[in-house]
Image (cartoon, coloured by chain):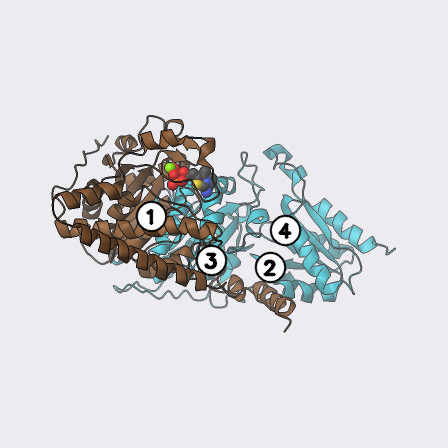
Amino acid sequence: MSNLSATIEPTGHAAPASEDAMDTVTRTGSETLSMNKAINAALADVLAENPRALVLGEDVGQLGGVFRITDGLQKRFGAERVFDTPLAESGILGMSVGLAMAGYHPIPEVQFDGFTYPAINQIVTQMARMNFRTRGALPMPITLRIPSFGGIQSPELHSESLEYIFAHVAGLKVVSPSSPHQAYHLMRHAATRPDPVVFMEPKSRYWQKDTVDFDDPGTLEGSVVVRPGRHLTLVAWGGMVARCLQVAELAAEDGIDVEVLDLRWLKPIDAAGLAASVSKTRRAVVVHEAPRSAGLGAEVAQTITEACFGTLKAPVERVTGFDVPFPSGSLEAEYLPNIDRILYGIQRVLEYQRG
Amino acid sequence: MTEAPRLEPHSTALPADELVELYRLMTKVRHLDTSAIAWQRQGILPGYAPMQGQEAAQVGSVRAMDTGRDFVFPTYREMGAALAAGVDMPEFMATHKATWNGGLYDATKYRFTPIQTVIAGSALHAVGWGHGQRLDAIREGRPETDLPTALIFLGDGASSQGDIHEAMNFAGIFKTPVVFFVQNNGWAISVPTEQQVAGGSVAARGAGYGIPAIKLDGNDVEAVVRGTRAAVEHARSGKGPAIVEAMTYRRGPHSTSDDPGRYRTLEDERRDAGADPIESLRDRLLADGTLDADAVTAIQAEAADFEEATRLAVQAQGPRPGAEMFEYVYQEQTEALKQQATQWREESEHV
Ligand SMILES: Cc1ncc(C[n+]2csc(CCOP(=O)(O)OP(=O)(O)O)c2C)c(N)n1
Ligand SMILES: [Mg+2]
């Protein structure tokens, strides 16, 4: 077996890896990257910095993952630190729990959102509770990567929005980036936390390029306003953020000034950020892909209502998936919140009459 | 395809002093177990999962480990294993006292994971932890021939769970230092092993995974220690996992709220229980002159004293402060949780 630290090699942007266990990674300046490349870069940096970080999952090694997010990592860091597991999601998560008990920071990948279901038991009854059960003696620094949400006409159970489960589970934290910049920095942040973080990657955005500023990550906790506006706040996360930005452009043509708030952290949700935005705009629409009933939109709406009831001009509107199983690809456009449906939601809020 | 090597019991017979120590431990365990049922009747504990009949399996298997560097992954019925591993008993009983789910003991101090209520829930943890021991050796440039090893307990009922298949398969693929210790005690609550284990033997499944296995008399503590030692030697030396299936019997009810009369008769129990693991060891030690009647009496008195001290400590164990609910959810507490903790304090403590 090779020595693990000896398998760390320098790459283009990273500072040369030392022989020591710890490497400090300094990427500087900015670069235009697709989201999949940005996450790949973040994982490489995490692996270089923390000799106890591990990447595991189905096809993540030689192949580099079906979405190529782990491309090249096994070659660079060795098959001990980046490894394929047998095809069993409960096994991947259960093994990650044990690796965390042994002092490692596993970064497991579940290949597609819907195949997280076979691992729900390990995630909910074990990973999320172990710190609590052991009164902090066995923390669970695990970063669970899940290619998530719809938008690419994929087969059944490849388009789930699992925040509807995980944002409810005590002991988990849940985050979803909406851009390459967010993806790079949120991954580096999530993968250095001492608690389990579910990292939901919007697969419809994997190939979209944008600037990643390595020098200024910006704030890493809470939500971010990605477009300021005066008349109404659109709250979204993951793949819906880009769509809401498009909607905001269209609404601007009609003189409606829409603020878009990227919620980012789905647990804990940023109550202060929501309140700050909506206390200014006094109207809000929350947009998500998951079915409406008991979805995270309800939590967002109630959080806004509690903070802004006195000044709200209309009830918080929800534009969401329907209460149906995520349909086949040819019906996907009917199911997902589209530009028209979001505009209707905005209209309902703007035209709302009290009493 | 890999042929699973046969696992033979460790060749060295146990010395007399080790047998006496095993008898001491098992006597303590029996006394405490019987008492814990009484404590439940007396209202000291809300519930308890008795393990009478499984003392040899639990004490013997843990004694085969190196408790200074190995790690034990129990279920909810492993009081005997916990005692043998040196876990603080009042802190262990805290789970049954409803003080803290999983127990109050420090899992890292005793190298004994918290009490697991999810059947088969810990098996993959043992595999992950064991894999971590391999990675440690590789990172530190040590040969993978002397590895800290995981001991994972599971029941005949647990063997039906998918996680056990995944754990055995992963362990076989990764050559993980893990010993799967199956206590086949005949029952999973009310369902007998015949209706649980297709093929009749969990050990036999090892062949399919290329994992060596041994099936042994779980009521004979020497057989348990020697069989488990062989399994641990195999795993520790880097050859991969091993399976021990200890055939034993759950002499008591499933739990203090169970009524075995609904699914088995006293006659069934007398017929199927096999030898009492403690009485047979005592008779053996008396017969070969290792112990005399006075020594046996002294060991029993020691067990009674231990029970009394444990009971007093369990009785004195008060509830945990409610603030701990909020404290241990995360390493990095969230703002929402801080607010809920504050609200709870204001509304329940009127401060
Ligand atoms: C996943 C799960 N399903 C059901 C239960 C309820 N339950 C608790 S113990 C038990 C029987 C377990 O039998 P076995 O594995 O043979 O262990 P034993 O009780 O004999 O020690 C059941 C069904 C549980 N705790 N976890
Ligand atoms: Mg059983």
Distance CA(mark 3)–CA(mark 2)? 29 Å
**Residue that numbered label 2 is attached to:** A269
Residue B159, given in percent of the width and then of the height, sits at 37, 35
Residue B298, given in percent of the width and then of the height, sits at 23, 56
**Residue that numbered label 3 is attached to:** B100
Chain B pictured colour: brown
Which SS class for mark 2? loop
Mark 1 on the same chain as mark 3: yes
State yes or no: discs 1 and 3 in contact (Cβ < 8 Å): no
Chain at tag 2: A
State yes or no: discs 3 and 4 in contact (Cβ < 8 Å): no
Indicate if the residue with disc 2 has its beta carbon within 8 Å of ligand 1: no
Q: Earlier in the sequence, mark 1 or mark 3?
A: 3
Q: Is residue B313 visible?
A: yes
Camera-near label (3 vs 4) is 3
Q: Is residue A345 left or right of residue B269?
A: right
Camera-near label (1 vs 3) is 3
Chain at tag 1: B
Distance CA(mark 2)–CA(mark 1)? 34 Å
Of the residues shown, which amino acid type is indicated by label 4?
Leu
Camera-near label (3 vs 2) is 3
Q: Which mark is residue A296?
A: 4
Mark 2 on the same chain as mark 1: no
Q: Which chain is drawn using cyan?
A: A
Which SS class for mark 3? loop
